[in-house]
Image: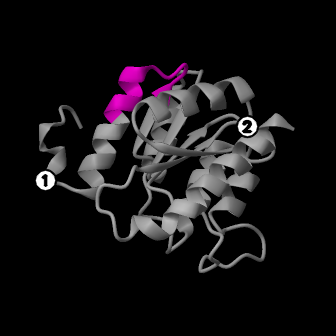
Amino acid sequence: MATSSSSSSSSSSSSSSSSSSASMGDEKPHVLAVDDSLVDRKLIEKLLTKSSCKVTTAENGKKALELLGLGDGQRTFNNNVCKVNLIITDYCMPGMTGYELLKKIKESPSMKHIPVVVVSSENVPTRIKKCLDEGAQEFMLKPLQLSDVTKLRCQLTKFSNPHKGMLCMGR
């Protein structure tokens, strides 16, 4: 049950500041972290928070789709929909894999522009290729390090404001 309280406390803080994000150009990037492991979710949340990101967590793909307004019967113009700049999802989760979540996001006209990063503890080249071919921004191996999150934060800056990201190195 701790996952729900973590998720809802992050959600509620994000929804209170989402109305001001349109007026503020330097708003913290909002990241949705999806992982069935509480330990991994907490690690990702801690690393992203250290990198000045706002974080909402979900314990599975179904919950992530609900937060994004893509759950069964939901409409994406709902005011309670979580507005995110990046989605980080574990590949191997019960119910819906990270790959299936990626596909659903990329099939949505209103969400397909959001970068999705897939993470896994298993280095399987065919899995990595499949995710990248389906539209994943990046595939990273667990456990995530601060340097991985710094790279993602840099890409987020580049994605939302190309001029600010000119100092970023790499992809």
The residue that disc 1 covers is 163
The reply, left or right, for residue 88 in relation to residue 3 is: left
Q: Under tag 2, what secondary structure? A: loop
Q: How is the image coloured?
A: one colour
Disc 1 crowd, CA 10 A, few/some/many (<14, 14-19, 20+): few
Is residue 59 in sight in this rendering? no
Q: Earlier in the sequence, mark 2 or mark 1?
A: 2
Q: Quadrant of residue 78?
A: bottom right
Q: Is residue 16 magenta?
A: no
Disc 2 crowd, CA 10 A, few/some/many (<14, 14-19, 20+): some
Q: Report the front residue among 106 and 5.
A: 5
Q: Name the residue rendered at 21%, 32% in the picture.
A: 170
Label 1 amino acid? His
Q: Report the front residue among 19 and 42.
A: 19
Q: Name the residue rendered at 69%, 23% in the picture.
A: 39
The disc label shown at residue 93, or none: 2
Label 2 amino acid? Met
Is residue 145 in sight in this rendering? yes
Q: Name the residue rendered at 29%, 62% in the picture.
A: 25
The quadrant the C terminus occupies is: top left
The reply, left or right, for residue 170 in relation to residue 153 is: left
Residue interval drawn in magenta: 140-151
- Above or below, comparing residue 163 to residue 97 in the picture: below
